[in-house]
Amino acid sequence: MVKVTLIPGDGIGPEVTNAARLVTTATGVDIEWEVVEAGEKAIQASGSPLPDNVLDSIRRNRLALKGPITTPIGGGFRSVNVALRQQLDLYASVRPARAIAGEGTRFPETDLIVVREATEGLYSGVEHWVDREHSAAETVNVITRKASDRIVRFAFELAKREKRRKVTAVHKANIMKTTGALFQTAFREMAAKYPEIPSEERLVDNMAMQLVKRPSEYDVIVTTNLFGDILSDLCAGLAGGLGIAPGALYGESIAVFEPVHGSAPKYAGQDKANPVAEILCLELLLRHLGKTEAAERVYRAVWQTIAEKKVVTYDLALPGYTNRPVAPSTCSAMAKEIARKVPLVDLRAPRPAPSASGTWGAPDPSLEGA
Ligand code: NAD
């Protein structure tokens, strides 16, 4: 049995994390969920959106599955997500963007991984008003050599382990002459240590254009916090939308799995959201645990459910997003269908494309067989 922290989160979070729990049961992997609240429910209960018991639970279990958490725009609390990443030093945000069964995408071959530095940059939280009138404000873009080195090393190690084609660094060093150049130098020096892995650089604006024109030219993308946040949503869109985009956050000894999407408040409580992103977070968690067969079952059950398109949520059913519009199903119905398929998956059948194996982050050998 392995104990994993579960943060249901806000908005659609409880619905999609329930879906992931249902699928976990279908895998037969013995996970005990330690449920803790962060976000709006935690504010009501304790006055803090990120109470100490949440951080304690994750530090103890070293593994968490998380739903999205709302961050109100403007005043009030700092982002729980940013605080969580900084306090647990979850420096590597890994967001695989895989098209599934060619649905919801013009680029069915899309198979990208965005590796985003998640503790500093323009999300450092160092910001202030310049004057009393609030007519000017500054946000400090903190880039350190230490954080740049470890994120680019993470990207090259991931590329090596996953046998990926190349690593592309994304920055804006032509305009940001100090912070951009520091990240660029860290990347160039690290690239020299991995001569067997092709590497290249792109300016972020050009990268956005290149990605929407020719996503298959890219593979592993490594970048700073804000650029990574934006590009990973863009890549999720290329692959089929936020509803199918999982993510993982890795620190030195802690991993937290959370979808790319947010709490989508307008769909909260409607049993409407796509549960696949959260279910694929479970897949990544199982791979991290060394439960490769269970993870593979989850991925293939998701793939088959989307390919069949009998039980899919609204985002995969609408005309314009698919060549074969169908009546949309609910979040819970799609989760049940995926769970039903998990034990029926034929693991001897060839893996459906894109066929990247995907340990994605840093599988933790100490958890093997837990
Ligand atoms: P969002 O990702 O919540 O929603 C954007 C749109 O994407 C939705 O309106 C919906 O159309 C679609 N969508 C998102 N998830 C979906 C799903 N599972 N199934 C189907 N469609 C889905 O982004 P937002 O509206 O910019 O943010 C809402 C809140 O979420 C904000 O408070 C934001 O700060 C927070 N947020 C949290 C996280 C996180 O917890 N990691 C990430 C992003 C945003």
Image (cartoon, helix red, strand yellow):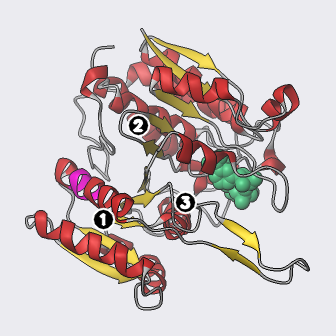
How crowded pointer 3 is (Cα within 10 Å; few <14, some 14-19, many 20+) is rated as: many
Q: Which residue is mark 2?
A: 284
Which residue is painted at 37% across and 33% down in the image? Answer: 253
Q: x and y percent of residue 115 in the render?
A: 39, 58
Query: Is the magenta region chiefly helix, strand or loop?
Result: helix
- Earlier along the polypeptide chain: callout 3 or callout 2? 3
Asked which secondary structure carries label 1, the reply is loop
Image position of 83 with respect to 54: above or below: below
How crowded pointer 2 is (Cα within 10 Å; few <14, some 14-19, many 20+) is rated as: many
Residue 219's disc number? 1
Give the amino acid type for the residue marked by disc 2 in the picture.
Answer: Leu
Residue 210 figure quarter:
bottom left
State whether residue 4 appears in this view: yes
Give the amino acid type for the residue marked by disc 1 in the picture.
Answer: Asp
Image position of 206 with respect to 199: above or below: below
The quadrant of the image that shows the C terminus is top left
Q: Which residue is mark 3?
A: 104
